[in-house]
Amino acid sequence: MRRNVFAVLLAVAAVALAAKPAGNGVLPALPYDPATTCIGPALPADADPRVAAIRAEQNQAAARGDKALARELESKLQAIYLEHQPAPGSAENAVRLVSRPGESSFDLPDALIDTGIIWATAADYEIDGTMWVAYSKYSPDSSVTIVRSVDHGTTWEWVQGFYTVPTSLVEHLGIVVGQGDSGFVYVFLVHPDNDGDMICVRFNRNGSGQVNSWVKSGTDTINNFRVCRDYSGDNYGLYCVAGDDDHTQEMDDFLLRSLDYGKTWAVTNTFRYASDGSYQAGAGSYLYMSGRPGFSPHNGQLGILVNPAWGAMDSWREVSVAPDTFMVMDPVIAPSFVTPPESAAIWTLYSHNYEGTGDWDMLCLYSTDAGLNWSGPQYLAGAVGADERFGDIKPYADPGNPWMNASYISEVSYRTVFRHYCNQADPSSWSDTLRINTNSAGTGPSVRPLLVYSPGAPGTGAGCLFVGEGLQNLYFNAPWLAGVAEQTQAGLEAGFSIMPNPAGERVRFNLPRSDGSRLVVYDAAGREVARLRAGSDVVWDRTDAHGDRVPAGVYITRLVSAEGSSSRRLVLR
């Protein structure tokens, strides 16, 4: 196997960090071994004679190109699988709504969504540009909150909130926003009942019409899951992989599907020997999944599944790839949103323990043949002395869109959220790193930075939802927010600079001369901190209007004159 050495794309905090070589050849699928295959043993419904009869009819419909009938028959199979599993019981009183909070204000540079200790986050978006976020807070009622932004992330409005009954701290969340007949907001969480049942809480877009349903209940403990929806029409299917990340070799994760707006969930397959499954739909009826082994000796192996038929029980195609024997973590998978879906490039992003040293890097594999063979691995980030972890990868779910975005955290002393983008035409060529955050980011599987698109935004690409250091506060930022914050008129851009930045005890502003201009410093919440005279050379000693020292943090400085205005971010140490 040929191996190439190439430069890593990343430099962190202006420190020259060495990179590591990685292979860039083709990784064929490992030999099929029934003892380690990720798809679990047959379910009771598989032996039902109706299943084989309906599947034969469905294959005939597919051969004629009748996708509508094939989908209708898939719903009949779903009903049969539901017959063979225990009824979950009522979830009507599993969560309780909370009162709408008072109005909040938001401002740049990182758009502050909420304050406090954040335990879990989830995000989704709509093609009209609306972004949705669900998050849980450590608070007296351990509440879950759903907010949305209709102005590309500049401001966020409260939509709904609830807490579990009995009250518990929600440590993992998912959110899916549908369209058409499925145009609801679906929020997923692990409920405390039975040591870890999973529930779906469904709302209308205005927060009304709450409906609760069990996704997976019973004696099985769920402590991690991923959810997604397909894009095959107005009646979207919902999909979930859920399990216990602490499981032993004998335990399985569950693949679940709902075809009735989240009201009932059938276990369609089990996901054996794997944890931390990542689920994503592509164009048409294709679904993709990746997972890592939950036990030795396969710590360096990735299980990758592709299903061309809405997650049909017997249609999973599985490959396993093992770049080497060192541990992999946090795999995420996504295809470009092109048709026919079998022509889509697919990327799998994961963290890798470099030679078992404890130095985590962000690596990527890609496939151009519907997941049969994988090329790589290549480094998205591989700095010596910095851990790169908790990746996210998402397609732009607009038909024919070839772009893919990826994000992750790089941690030295300051946790930076980075974003890259790539194109279907050249799946191994990722962009240079683009830093997203101003506030240092928090880390953890439940609060990893999450990509959120906002079609129609003033810029291009995706922004990121992230939690601050110490899990304090929830933020959103994107390239277009920086553009909005730094809009200028009448040539002010060239004359406005801050030295140094970040700054210590004294800050120097180089400003254009303009009668009647003023320089105002705001904190991250938008409150005025100081107002300074304008001139060619202004020095600020970090005191506010009362003579008190301004604390370290992120600030906005705004120069306003008769000719226009200009803003800059300022970091005080």
Image (tube, grey):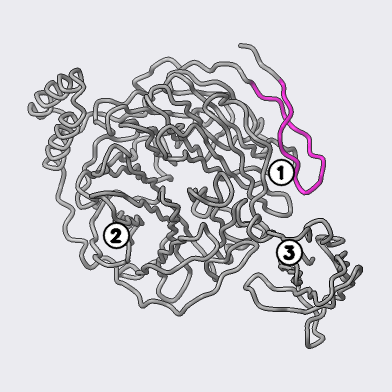
Residue 415 x %, y %: 67, 53
Q: Residue at x 75, y 32 (%)?
A: 19
- Magenta span: 5-23
Q: Which residue is drawn at 41% across and 62% down?
A: 170
Q: How many marks?
A: 3
Q: Can residue 124 be seen in this view?
A: no
> In the rendered view, does 24 fall on the left or right side of 100?
right
| Tag of residue 386 | 1
Q: Looking at numbered disc 3 in the image, what kind of residue is underneath it?
A: Ser
Q: Which of 522 and 483 is in front in this view?
A: 483
| Tag of residue 201 | 2
| Tag of residue 143 | none
Q: Looking at numbered disc 2 in the image, what kind of residue is underneath it?
A: Val
Using a 10 Å C-alpha cutoff, classify the residue at mark 2 as few (fewer than 14 neighbours), some (14 to 19) or many (20 or more).
many
Q: Looking at numbered disc 1 in the image, what kind of residue is underneath it?
A: Ala
Q: In which quarter of the image is the C terminus?
A: bottom right
- Ranked by sequence position, the earlier of labels 2 and 3 is 2
Mark 2 → mark 3, Cα distance in angstroms: 44 Å
